[in-house]
Image: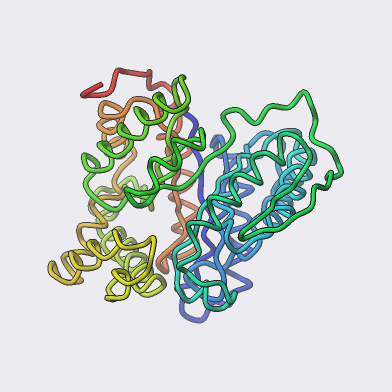
């Protein structure tokens, strides 16, 4: 299994500047290669200390020059906020700069405050994503970009540099599915699914295995492994790992609630996002403290041995997957984040590389 690191550039620290946090997390990206990881990813977010990474192409261009082996993951490009023509140009250029190391993830985005700042109606998110994904996938393979709308109007144009005809994007294209209605769309696109841990894994396994079957039905072939994203605390002491997790993964959860307004009541009236209202209702019913604790348990913390055991349980349920881990978040001291990443790289990554594919339960 390929194991990656997600950089989120979150500044939930006191008396530490955005620049210090940003440059620290960039160096964590360099450290992923030295620590044995297979890929390093950057999110895309704007206008908030929740996640300060407005241009993940620029971030990964920097990391391309500081590394030689690790794959470079766009996790993800928010297509409704980006001109698909520019996405095609930048993806091809970054791939050629890095020697074919790009993993391209696509997403429709969720935060109302980001949509409003860009002047894009959030209710247009789904149609903009669907149209943008079609344009981008055709463009990076053919080198030609065109669209007749309704969201993007682009007379056919050839991009330069042209894509390398000997370079395949197979196994390097991904799309996020964080709601049930996104799962069949990802399957129809013929790309690999990305998801963040939010619930007990059994619930995620049902969705992931459902995507696999939809993919087989739509594409007539086996899908590649899904990407599973966790917020991770790895520590030699189990009690300390738990303490750090319940402080900092908990704080990250609260930042998610704030950034996306997950506790609000507007989701029901937002076309394309109605399913998020059920989650918002569950949070209110359970209470914020109980919801935060459940989120901590859905993610990954513990000693290296405990973490390997948790991943092994997931492997039994869905077969091979691509584990992604974020280490710097929720105000975790920067030195602790670096230590956690190094320990995970030293003791967890080799064990994950050894895991062999099994037939998922229920398949």
Eyeballing the image, is 122 above or below 240? below
Q: Residue at x 72, y 41 (%)?
A: 139
Q: Classify residue 124 as left or right of residue 229.
A: right
Where does the image place residue 275, in percent across and percent down from the top left?
29, 59
Q: Residue at x 48, y 76 (%)?
A: 113
Where does the image place residue 354, in percent across and percent down from the top left?
41, 21
Q: Classify residue 168 as left or right of residue 212.
A: right
Q: Nearer the viewer, residue 160 or 38?
A: 160
Q: Quadrant of the N terminus?
A: top left
Where does the image place residue 88, in percent across and percent down from the top left?
72, 47
Labels in figure, total: 0
Q: Residue at x 21, y 39 (%)?
A: 202
Q: Quadrant of the C terminus?
A: top left
Q: Residue lying at the far bottom in this picture: please name it.
A: 15
Eyeballing the image, is 301 above or below 346? below
Q: Residue lying at the far right in this picture: please name it.
A: 160
């Amino acid at each position: 299994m390929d194991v990656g690191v997600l950089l989120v550039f979150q500044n939930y620290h006191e008396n530490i500047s955005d620049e210090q946090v940003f440059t620290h997390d960039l160096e964590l990206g360099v450290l992923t290669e030295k620590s044995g990881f297979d890929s390093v990813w950057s999110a895309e977010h704007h206008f908030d200390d929740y996640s300060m990474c407005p241009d993940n192409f620029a971030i990964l261009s920097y990391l391309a020059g500081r590394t030689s082996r690790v794959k470079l993951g766009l996790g993800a490009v928010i297509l409704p906020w980006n001109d698909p023509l520019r996405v095609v140009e930048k993806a091809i250029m970054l791939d050629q700069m890095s020697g074919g190391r790009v993993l391209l993830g696509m997403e429709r985005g969720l935060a109302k405050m980001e949509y409003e700042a860009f002047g894009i109606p959030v209710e247009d998110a789904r149609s903009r994503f669907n149209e943008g994904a079609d344009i981008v996938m055709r463009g990076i393979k053919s080198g030609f970009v065109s669209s007749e709308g309704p969201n993007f109007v682009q007379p056919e144009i050839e991009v330069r540099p042209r894509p390398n005809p000997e370079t395949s994007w197979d196994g390097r294209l991904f799309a996020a599915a964080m709601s049930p209605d996104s799962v069949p769309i990802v399957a129809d696109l013929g790309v690999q699914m990305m998801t963040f841990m939010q619930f007990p894994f059994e619930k995620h396994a049902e969705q992931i295995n459902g995507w696999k079957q939809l993919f087989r039905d739509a594409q007539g072939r086996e899908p590649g492994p899904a990407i599973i994203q966790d917020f991770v605390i790895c520590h030699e002491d189990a009690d300390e790992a738990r303490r750090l997790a319940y402080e900092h993964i908990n704080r990250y959860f609260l930042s998610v609630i704030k950034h996306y307004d997950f506790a609000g009541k507007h989701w029901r009236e937002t076309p394309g996002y109605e399913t998020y209202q059920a989650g918002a209702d569950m949070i209110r019913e359970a209470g914020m403290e109980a919801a935060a604790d459940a989120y901590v348990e859905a993610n990954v913390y513990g000693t290296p041995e405990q973490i390997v055991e948790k991943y092994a349980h997931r492997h039994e349920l869905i077969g091979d997957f691509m584990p992604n881990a974020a280490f710097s978040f929720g105000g975790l001291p920067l030195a602790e984040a670096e230590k956690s990443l190094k320990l995970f790289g030293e003791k967890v990554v080799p064990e994950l590389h050894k895991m062999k594919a099994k037939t998922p339960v229920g398949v």
